[in-house]
Image: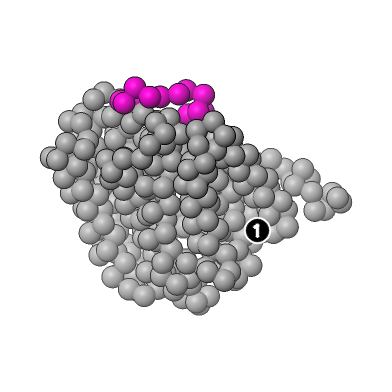
Amino acid sequence: MSAATSPVAVPFNYWVQAARLKFLPQGVLPVIIGGAAAVSQEVFNPGYFVLAFIAAAAVQVGLTMFNDTLDFQYGTDRSTPGAKNPFSGGSGVLTTGRIQPRQAMQVIIGLYILALVIGIYFAFVVGIASLGIAAIGAAISIVYSARPFRLAYRGLGELAMLIGYGPVITGWAYYIHAGVLTSDILLIGLIPGLSMWTMILINEIPDYAEDRQAGKKNLTYRLGPAGAKNLFIGSLAGIYIFIAWLLIIGVLPGAAGLVFGGLPLAFAAARAAHLHYSNPLKVAAANKYMVLVYFVTNTAVAAGLLIG
């Protein structure tokens, strides 16, 4: 393999930029929630948790790079980083030529192989059903952007991410400890799923013009920035309403009420979205607050499960 096409030839800091680690919590917090639920049920295996965390992190980074690479090849993300909201669009390493698509794909394949090896291990030690659950998540991550499905281009990407980053990852992360899936863990898994849905909505708004030009018919393309902003605010409120319902019916322990400590961040995100949805750069405040809402909400859910 020539140096020009080898991932090793790319400076490490460019790979860190490509990984967009500020979005890593979206991949690993469902695993933490699943692990916390296993602790609460006294079925927790620390070794399995570490392996699941590594697999989820590998898929999250791989998926981020995969989506960026396909969007670049499809012509969706072609702007330079300086012209972009830092919380939306691609990482910028492809548009500037710092990393070539072929180099990115080599690393993406390596990350998915790592996750696959861990998934196969769990199939042997826990049961084949664990691999089936993981396969659903992997399939969602691929068909989100890849042809011929391209769910993100057909208005189905947001729903796919809700399912994949919600009940699927959370359910798998619990199953490898307990060997069973319960309705309660699937309901709890909807919390990171709804959080992911909401984050995607606000992240699509700054990319509206580029997505429309490229024919990426996501929900923001279909609703327009104003409609997407309203759906974002409604979805943000929906997260807290859903959590309150889970607390009332006893699916979540009372300690999970810690979630509501993040309400000031949610209000700030909603306000920034309402005021700046038509300005791709100023709406970055809403993007930033939503990242914090995701982290605080799902960390509080995990903490609540541990406290009981």
Q: Main secondary structure of the magenta part?
A: helix
Does dot 1 land on a helix, a strand or a loop? loop
Q: Position of residue 111 (x, y in %)?
A: 63, 44
Looking at the image, residue 164 lies above or below residue 34: below
Residue in the picture at 29% in, 60% down:
232
Looking at the image, residue 89 lies above or below residue 246: below
Judge whether residue 205 is colored magenta: no
Residue highlighted by disc 1: 94
Q: Position of residue 109 (x, y in %)?
A: 67, 50
In the image, the segment drawn in magenta is: 39-55
Compare residues 18 and 49 and report the one nearer the observer: 49
Residue in the picture at 50% in, 37% down:
127
Specify the farthest residue to the right: 2
Q: Is residue 127 visible?
A: yes
Compare residues 256 and 143 and report the one nearer the observer: 143
Quadrant containing the C terminus in the rendered view: top left
Compare residues 21 and 279 and report the one nearer the observer: 21
Q: Is residue 27 visible?
A: no
